Image (spheres, grey):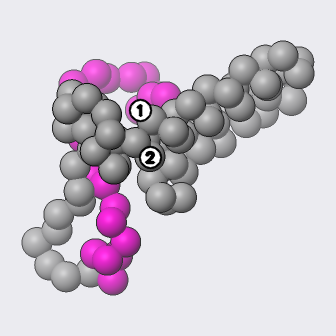
Amino acid sequence: MEIVIHAFISACLDYCNAPFTYFGKTSLDRLQFDQNAAAKLLTRALHGQTPSYISQLLQPDVTSRTLRSSEQGLLSVPQSRLKTKAGFTC
């Protein structure tokens, strides 16, 4: 579970960490609230407690060979049709 949350949320927060030093307490509290809400949604989706359109977004990572990470329950990252200048989107 921790790996999934890190992949979806923490990576985006870590990517732009420097500007957070200039945020006020209210803004940081809002970010924390959003991060907690996303973690709850992800937890529910992984346990099938969300509408199907949300659960369908979470697909297990399937490889053609056996890897050590196969037992970790990793999720695949879907291909995006959007192109960004920096190559990273949050």
For residue 87, the mark is 1
Can residue 15 be seen by looking at this rendering?
Answer: no
Instruction: Report whether 30 appears left or right of 23.
Output: left
56 vs 86: above or below: below
Task: Residue 17: name its quadrant.
Answer: top right
For residue 43, the mark is 2
Which residue is drawn at the image coordinates 28% and 22% (left, top)? 82
46 vs 86: above or below: below
Q: Mark 1: few, some, or many residues within 10 Å (few <14, many ≥20)?
A: few
25 vs 2: above or below: above
**Spatial CA span between label 1 and label 2:** 28 Å
Can residue 35 be seen by looking at this rendering?
Answer: yes
User: Quick check: is 73 in the magenta stretch?
Assistant: yes
Q: Position of residue 79 (x, y in %)?
A: 22, 38
User: Quick check: is 32 in the magenta stretch?
Assistant: no
Please name the amino acid that badge 2 sits on.
Answer: Thr
Give the tally of numbered discs.
2
Per the rendered image, the range of residues in magenta is 68-90
The secondary structure type at the circle numbered 2 is helix
Q: Mark 2: few, some, or many residues within 10 Å (few <14, many ≥20)?
A: some
Most foreground residue, 7 or 85: 7
Discs 1/2, front: 2
Q: Position of residue 40 (x, y in %)?
A: 51, 39
Which residue is drawn at the image coordinates 19% and 82% (left, top)? 66
Instruction: Report whether 48 appears left or right of 42.
Output: left
Task: Residue 89: name its quadrant.
Answer: top left
The secondary structure type at the circle numbered 1 is loop
Q: Position of residue 62 (x, y in %)?
A: 17, 63
Which residue is drawn at the image coordinates 27% and 52% (left, top)? 76
